[in-house]
Image: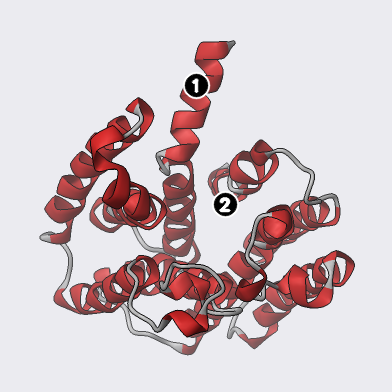
């Protein structure tokens, strides 16, 4: 069991799990718009997520403790390097328009991790974009939405229609709702300067907000020119499941509740779409 737990922890800590979720949402976009399986954009998104997330999570640790890194972090660094190389490999296969969007997203990811702002804006010593009050969840949701919708659409030579932008907004709202259990879990760890949603309005109102976000996610379908019934049914199922996770979340839940089960919901959504 110890080995199984270690493998599971590596699977989560190395960002493979979250990368599969991004991969799943990207594939869902292809299915919604009746596009063929696009290996280049899907694999790129997968490896780029691993690279980006590990850069954001471990940059500070690697910067200050590079001579005494724990063994697990060294393994993740090596794994991240090979993921980066594969990301570059698939990047050369993408369309020019996609590369332009990626450049913007890359800058956002870089600023999210690298200190660059005056210390007076923070309670602690770090000065990166993720610590600006109330900004963290919106940055993550926006990056996910553009990565999982706009990139697959552009790489398949499709126009950015109204339906595409509605889907972008849906994914943005869905990811915001998906992050509610994480925000509640981190309540006892986050700096008060972060001004997270639970810090500002409390846990109960945060859960209500999460439910409202899911209702908005579903409601946005009425603005689409056509509604594909069997896709809508699966969205309803996903909404109900995520709603339960939000309602039963608390700051005392163990890390697997959010980092594994909640994070796995886009993967489960893809399975519903495929089968």
The residue lying at 48 percent from left, 48 percent from top is 18
Q: In which quarter of the image is residue 206?
A: bottom right
Q: In x, y percent, where is residue 106?
A: 27, 70
Q: Quadrant of the C terminus?
A: top right
Q: Is mark 2 on a helix, strand or loop?
A: helix
Q: Quadrant of residue 126?
A: bottom left
Relative vertical location of residue 13 with respect to residue 249 in this rendering, above or below: above
Q: Residue 110 carries which label?
A: none
Foreground: disc 2 or disc 1: 1
Q: Can residue 238 be seen here?
A: no
Please state which of residues 242 and 155 is positioned toward the viewer in this rendering.
Answer: 242
Q: Name the residue under label 1.
A: 6
Marks 2 and 1, the one that precedes in the sequence: 1
Q: Quadrant of the N terminus?
A: top right
The residue lying at 54 percent from left, 72 percent from top is 136
Q: In x, y percent, where is residue 74?
A: 28, 33
Q: In which quarter of the image is residue 79?
A: top left
224 displayed left or right of 159? right
């Amino acid at each position: 069991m110890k080995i199984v737990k270690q493998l599971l922890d590596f699977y989560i800590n190395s960002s493979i799990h979250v990368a599969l979720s991004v991969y799943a949402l990207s594939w869902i976009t292809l299915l919604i718009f009746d596009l063929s399986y696009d290996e280049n954009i899907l694999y790129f998104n997968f490896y780029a997520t691993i690279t980006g997330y590990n850069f954001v999570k471990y940059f500070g640790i690697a910067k200050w403790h590079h001579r005494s890194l724990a063994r697990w972090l060294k393994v993740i660094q090596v794994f991240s390097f090979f993921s980066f190389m594969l990301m570059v490999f698939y990047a050369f296969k993408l369309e020019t328009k996609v590369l332009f969007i990626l450049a913007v997203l890359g800058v956002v990811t870089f600023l999210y991790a690298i200190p660059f702002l005056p210390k007076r804006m923070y309670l602690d010593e770090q000065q990166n974009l993720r610590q600006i009050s109330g900004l963290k969840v919106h940055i993550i949701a926006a990056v996910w939405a553009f990565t999982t919708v706009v990139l697959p659409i552009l790489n398949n030579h499709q126009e950015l229609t109204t339906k595409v932008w509605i889907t972008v907004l849906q994914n943005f709202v869905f990811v915001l709702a998906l992050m509610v259990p994480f925000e509640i879990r981190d309540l006892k760890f986050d700096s008060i300067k972060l001004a997270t949603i639970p810090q500002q309005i409390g846990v109960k109102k945060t859960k209500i907000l999460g439910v409202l976000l899911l209702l908005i996610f579903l409601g946005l379908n009425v603005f689409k020119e056509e509604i594909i019934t069997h896709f809508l049914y699966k969205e309803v199922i996903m909404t109900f499941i995520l709603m339960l996770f939000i309602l039963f979340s608390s700051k005392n839940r163990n890390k697997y509740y959010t980092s594994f089960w909640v994070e796995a919901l886009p993967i489960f959504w893809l399975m519903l779409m495929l089968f």
